[in-house]
Image: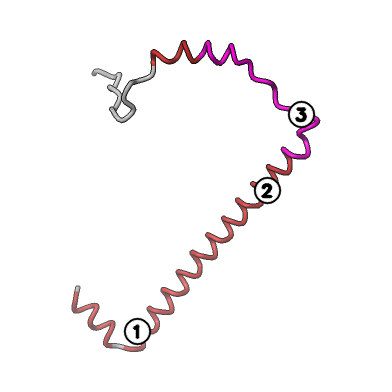
Amino acid sequence: METVVERILSHPLLTLALLLLCILLLYAVLKRLVKMLLCVAVMVVAYFGYVHFLEDDYPLPDIDEDLVDGWRDTVAPLLPDDWNRTFLDGNQS
């Protein structure tokens, strides 16, 4: 493997071609990441704008605290004490 790397590095034209290939690859990856980030940013802004403008027409329902407390009391005994412990596989075959 070292001989291959030495041969590539000793030949300046091949080194330049590989360097340009790496730069183009890095440029393509960064360009795609920037496009994805812009798309996500546009979707987030559109969602918050949608929520802001339609908040008066479609308000969120009020939460019944008694119902939430009842569910919390029902589910609390079923939750594990230690969340870092793995759950036992139910398939005992």
Using the image as rendered, state which of residue 93 and residue 29 is in the foreground: 29
Q: Residues within 10 Å of mark 1 (few under 14, many from 20)?
A: few
> Reading the chain from its start, which is encountered first: label 2 or label 3?
2
Q: Position of residue 62 (x, y in %)?
A: 68, 21
Q: Does the magenta portion include 68?
A: yes
The mark that comes first in sequence, 1 or 2, is: 1
| Residue that mark 2 sits on | 45
Q: Is residue 49 magenta?
A: no
Q: Could you tell me which residue is drawn at 33 percent across and 21 percent down?
A: 81
**Where is residue 27 drawn, in percent x and y?**
50, 70
Q: Is 80 placed above or below 73 here?
A: below
Residue tagged 3: 58
User: Tag 1: residue type?
Assistant: Leu
State the CA–CA distance, disc 1 to disc 2.
Answer: 46 Å
Few, some or many C-alpha atoms within 10 Å of disc 2 (few <14, some 14-19, many ≥20)? few
Q: Residues within 10 Å of mark 3 (few under 14, many from 20)?
A: few
Q: Residue at x 68, y 48 (%)?
A: 45
Q: Which mark is residue 71?
A: none
Q: Secondary structure at mark 1?
A: helix
First to last magenta residue range? 51-71
Q: Are marks 1 and 2 in contact (CB under 8 Å)?
A: no
Rendered image: mark on residue 14: 1
Q: SS at mark 2?
A: helix
The C terminus lies in quadrant: top left
Q: Which kind of residue does numbered mark 3 sit on?
A: Tyr
